[in-house]
Image (cartoon, grey):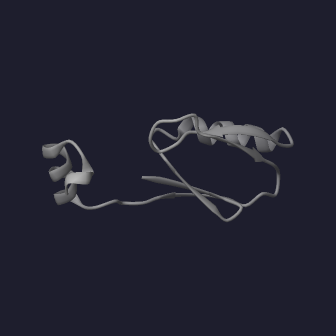
Amino acid sequence: MNRLTVDGRDYFLPEPVTELKQQILEAIKSGGGYVNVPPLRGGPGIDILFSPGMPVTWSQIEVGGAESAAAVAETGTADDI
């Protein structure tokens, strides 16, 4: 799972994040701009204004382990675990 922390707020993101990282970097390089951050699950996402000097941190978080991943693959959803 990917976590984007912007100015102290956490946003959990679906894969892939490569294009989103590029959009954020371009917004910051151009002096600031809005970037749509997609939700972890369906929906329109959220527009965030990124500007130079704004604290932005990317993290990758391991959720569960190999056993949990196998259980999800078998059941099709993490809610059943």
At x 69% / y 42%, what residue is drawn?
24
> Would residue 36 appear left or right of 75 to someone viewing this image?
right
- Give the camera-side residue of 20 and 34: 34
At x 81% / y 57%, what residue is drawn?
53
Q: Position of residue 2 (x, y in %)?
A: 48, 52
> Would residue 15 appear left or right of 46 to someone viewing this image?
left
- Give the camera-side residue of 8 and 53: 8
Indicate whether 61 appears above or below 70. Answer: below
Quadrant in which the C terminus is drawn? bottom left
Residue lying farthest to the right in this orientation: 31
Residue lying farthest to the left in this orientation: 74
Q: Position of residue 21 (x, y in %)?
A: 61, 42
Q: Which quadrant holds residue 5?
A: bottom right
Indicate whether 8 appears above or below 60. Answer: below
> Would residue 10 appear left or right of 67 to someone viewing this image?
right
At x 16% / y 59%, what residue is drawn?
67
> Would residue 45 appear left or right of 68 to someone viewing this image?
right
- Give the camera-side residue of 38 and 44: 44
At x 76% / y 47%, what residue is drawn?
50
Counting labels gives: 0
Q: Position of residue 70 (x, y in %)?
A: 16, 51
Q: Which quadrant holds residue 10?
A: bottom right
Q: Position of residue 65 (x, y in %)?
A: 24, 61
